[in-house]
Amino acid sequence: MTGKKVIITGVPGVGKTSVITESIRRLEEEGVPYQSINFGTFMFEVAQKENMVQDRDEMRKLDKNTQKRLQQLASQAIARIDGNVIIDTHASVKTPVGFLAGLPEWVLKELKPDLIILVETDSDQILKRRLSDASRVRDIEGYRDIQDHQDFNRAVAAAYAMFTGCTIRYIKNPDFLLEKAVEDMVQTLR
Ligand code: AP5
């Protein structure tokens, strides 16, 4: 397989998809094509076909072993995609029984990422974005819980770097500064 594999993560509502979408448009203009793949969509297609869920926000509530099976199937399918690929996913998923690693060994072995990016911002901004997004069924939690999740993601990303030898980059996406986040992302992916 040729091309770069970049994994982009961030807690729900941090705006990673917004940053990815605009960055890909800018890179395309510069002649650096990337394909964006949403890991959750690959999982959701199987989960829906097997009548396990009605919407993507129900997946994190499924039994842990079911989530792991969906993860494995998604990573195997994504690994077959050629060229520069951005994988929009989660460093960890908050399930009712604790954090589930988004990129465990069997996923990393398939994806072999060159780089993992964590999109972050202040937790109170994430809380506000979740509350104003009517299109999704976001977990209701306070900003301290959101901060715990961001902290856990940094910790688990260090383990992913140890396991794969990939680099880890943090990109900030604060309110009113989406353009700056896109600039940082484009520079990193160029
Ligand atoms: P997925 O749909 O990828 O998860 P998500 O993070 O919940 O969804 P979004 O992509 O919508 O979040 P986002 O933060 O990128 O938001 P957006 O850009 O829209 O995954 C779904 C499910 O799949 C997961 O829950 C999990 O179950 C499963 N899954 C996925 N990967 C997995 C894995 N590896 N292992 C196991 N399970 C996995 O932005 C949000 C809002 O913020 C928008 O309103 C936007 O306008 C606003 N915004 C963005 N940037 C700014 C800014 N700078 N200033 C102000 N507002 C901003």
Image (cartoon, grey):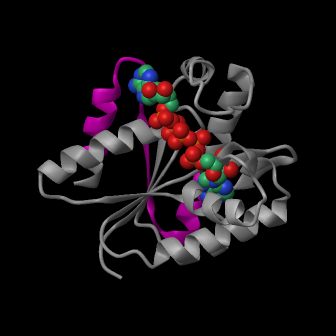
Q: Residue furthest bottom?
A: 1
Taking the spot 83% from the left edge, 60% from the top edge, the residue there is 64
Q: Quadrant of residue 163?
A: bottom right
The percent coordinates of residue 56 (x first, y second) are 66, 48
Residue 113 appears at what percent x and percent y? 45, 67
Side of 77 where 144 appears, left or right: right
Above or below: residue 179 compared with residue 3? above
Percent across and percent down for residue 166 are 45, 64
What are the residue bounds of the magenta stretch?
A: 157-186
| Position of residue 48 in the picture relative to residue 15 (left or right) | right
Name the image quarter holding residue 4. bottom left
Instruction: Decide: is 125 above or below 121.
Output: above
148 over 187 or under it: above or below = above
For the N terminus, the quadrant is bottom left
Q: Within the displayed image, which quadrant is ligand 1 positioned in?
A: top right
Give the residue at x 69% y 67%.
70
Question: Closer to the camera, 38 or 158?
Answer: 38
Q: Quadrant of the C terminus?
A: bottom left
Viewer can see residue 134: yes
Q: Is residue 184 left or right of residue 5?
A: left
Is residue 174 visible from the viewing direction of this image? no
Assess whether residue 143 is covered by the magenta stretch. no
